[in-house]
Image (tube, helix red, strand yellow):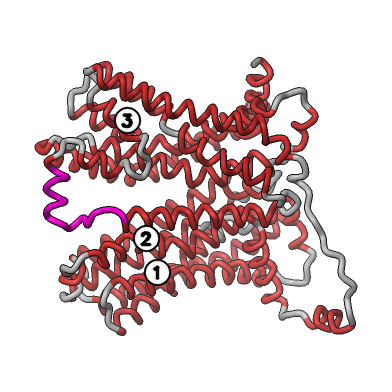
């Protein structure tokens, strides 16, 4: 067991960069102050979103308390965190367990499979705790304060917070270890990552479809009556996604009763059993799947004269550089899953619940009355453009475009293409993917809602302009503070603060547009003209900034 703790300490130091951080702080405090400043900026930026989330939970508590359903806000937070941990846990496990830079070196150490997997599992778990904090802490605090909970509640809440990520992370670990051992794809790691990510997304979509199809109609009066008269009705409904979360919810609302302790022990038992199964699977299969996971294959082909002629034709310089950017995005699993795939699938995932619910019921959907008025169409336009702006910022294609080059960025100094054209090619790749996501979202909304052609045309026109300043701002952010020293692609994306700043900027822009349009503009044509003017002006200013300061910054980075 001492070996496990020693390995865990080393992995934590390497993963979070603690040792290098401490060495720098001994002589110079600027890196420490810079990290602290970035952390405070992130906290300040996400504070409005957390405040809105807390406000909704408070309103939900006040609305549900007279019905005895206030415990539903606890289950909401628990289920939300469990879903996030499971979905993103798959990607973390694949990358950190098998394709980290130090993965192969662990094979030579006198450690068993469960010790190595357990240590890596614990590092990922710490990362998941940080992700769960803003989603789970507010409902725990709000319910405890507003209900005047006892000391036992707060004790159960602290234990529950530590237990919540265990089960979903274990469920993400077990199939990953099994696939890596038996899929016989360890020599094609990039393909395995992409296929694994697509499989997870397909399972998530399929599960959502099954959940929505098998569930009762949410607009059925009889169902609503039964739901609200049962004290645990809402909790039971939400916990169907992760059934074990029901035990923790019951433990918290019944903390002063013996049944609450029983429910907490049940939840703890299921969580720890899942961890034990994951570690047991690692003991049997982890090392066997790890062998060869860093190897790649290459095809050997005799080129014909026609192949040489085709390769010699080439593309115009800007398009060649753009094609290089697109190949990097589509062939690198971390970039493909987190940038390309999310950008294309978010529209589908957003509309599936509403589409199925609309098909399940015979009465008119609420938005049909909304679209009959000009003000309703304006609100819809602002909301859709806000979502498109957020999607563009969250895929972080330009916010990592310089960081993706890594230590080889200096090569950009020697290729026969000016920095202006290199910047233009990077913007073009992000713009095309952003437009693709926007078009898919508009199509999904059109399938869901009876939009007229003029409104669709305005949505498409505004979205093509609205995404431009977002991608330009993302590139400026990455130029200002690129992450060029990384060991694997996951660090260039997942451990890059520029991704967070890009998302926050998109939230601020999208939120500001929605507020201004809904507050002051009441016709879709006026809203479209206002957004075209605002986004167009911002895009022009940022483009000028990129072509001046951005070019100088590229020269500085390339040395």
Q: Secondary structure at mark 3?
A: helix
The residue lying toward the viewer, choosing from 5 and 480, is: 5
Q: Residue at x 70, y 59 (%)?
A: 555
Q: Residue at x 78, y 53 (%)?
A: 296
Left or right? Give the position of 240 relative to 432.
Answer: left
Left or right? Give the position of 222 relative to 290.
Answer: left
Contact, mark 2 vs mark 1 (Cβ under 8 Å): yes
Where is residue 359 drawn, in percent x and y? 27, 67
> In front: mark 3 or mark 2?
3
Compared with 259, 196 (above or below) is: below
Question: Which contiguous range is marked in magenta?
Answer: 214-228
> Dot 1 corresponds to which residue?
441
Q: What secondary structure predominates along the stretch shown in magenta?
A: helix
Q: What mark, if any, has residue 247 been given in the picture? A: 3
Look at the image and tell me in which quarter the N terminus lies: top right
> In front: mark 1 or mark 3?
3
């Amino acid at each position: 067991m001492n070996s496990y703790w020693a390995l865990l300490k080393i992995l934590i130091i390497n993963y979070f960069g603690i040792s290098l951080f401490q060495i720098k702080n001994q002589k110079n405090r600027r890196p420490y102050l810079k990290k602290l400043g970035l952390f405070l900026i992130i906290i300040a930026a996400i504070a409005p979103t957390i405040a809105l989330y807390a406000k909704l939970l408070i309103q939900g508590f006040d609305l549900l308390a007279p019905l005895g359903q206030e415990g539903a806000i606890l289950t909401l937070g628990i289920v939300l965190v469990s879903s996030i941990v499971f979905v993103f846990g798959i990607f973390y496990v694949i990358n950190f367990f098998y394709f980290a830079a130090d993965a192969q070196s662990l094979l030579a150490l006198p450690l068993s499979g469960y010790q190595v997997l357990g240590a890596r599992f614990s590092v990922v778990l710490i990362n998941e705790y940080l992700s769960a904090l803003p989603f789970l802490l507010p409902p725990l605090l709000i319910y405890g304060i507003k209900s005047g909970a006892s000391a036992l509640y707060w004790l159960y809440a602290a234990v529950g917070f530590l237990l919540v990520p265990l089960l979903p992370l274990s469920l993400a670990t077990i199939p990953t270890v099994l696939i890596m051992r038996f899929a016989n794809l360890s020599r094609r790691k990039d393909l395995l990552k992409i296929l694994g990510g697509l499989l997870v997304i397909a399972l998530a979509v399929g599960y959502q479809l099954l959940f929505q199809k098998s569930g009762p109609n949410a607009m059925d009066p009889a169902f609503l009556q039964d739901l609200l008269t049962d004290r645990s009705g809402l909790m039971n409904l939400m916990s169907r996604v992760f059934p074990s979360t029901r035990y923790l919810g019951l433990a918290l609302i019944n903390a002063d009763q013996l049944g609450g302790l029983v429910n907490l022990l049940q939840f703890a038992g299921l969580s720890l059993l899942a961890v034990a199964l994951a570690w047991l699977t690692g003991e049997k299969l982890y090392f066997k799947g790890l062998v060869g996971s860093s190897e790649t294959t290459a095809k050997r082909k005799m080129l014909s004269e026609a192949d040489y002629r085709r390769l010699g034709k080439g593309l115009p310089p800007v398009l060649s550089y753009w094609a290089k950017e697109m190949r990097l995005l589509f062939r690198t699993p971390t970039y493909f899953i987190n940038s390309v795939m999310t950008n294309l699938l978010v529209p589908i995932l957003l509309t599936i619940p509403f589409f199925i619910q609309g098909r399940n019921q015979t009465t008119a959907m609420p938005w049909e009355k909304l679209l009959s008025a000009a003000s309703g169409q304006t609100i819809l336009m602002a909301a859709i453009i806000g979502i498109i702006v957020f999607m563009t910022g969250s895929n972080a294609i330009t916010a990592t475009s310089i960081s993706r080059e890594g230590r080889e960025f200096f090569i950009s100094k020697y290729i026969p293409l000016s920095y202006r054209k290199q910047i233009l090619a990077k913007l073009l790749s992000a713009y095309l993917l952003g437009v693709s996501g926007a078009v898919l979202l508009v199509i999904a909304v059109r399938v869901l809602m009876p939009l007229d052609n003029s409104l669709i045309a305005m949505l498409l026109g505004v979205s093509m302009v609205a995404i431009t300043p977002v991608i330009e701002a993302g590139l400026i952010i990455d130029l200002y503070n690129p992450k060029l020293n990384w060991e694997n692609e996951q660090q260039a994306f997942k451990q890059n603060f520029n991704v967070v700043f890009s998302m926050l900027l998109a939230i601020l822009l999208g939120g500001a547009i929605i507020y201004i349009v809904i507050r002051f503009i009441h016709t879709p044509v006026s809203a479209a003209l206002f957004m075209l003017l605002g986004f167009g002006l911002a895009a022009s200013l940022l483009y000028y900034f990129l072509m001046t300061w951005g070019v100088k910054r590229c020269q500085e980075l390339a040395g």
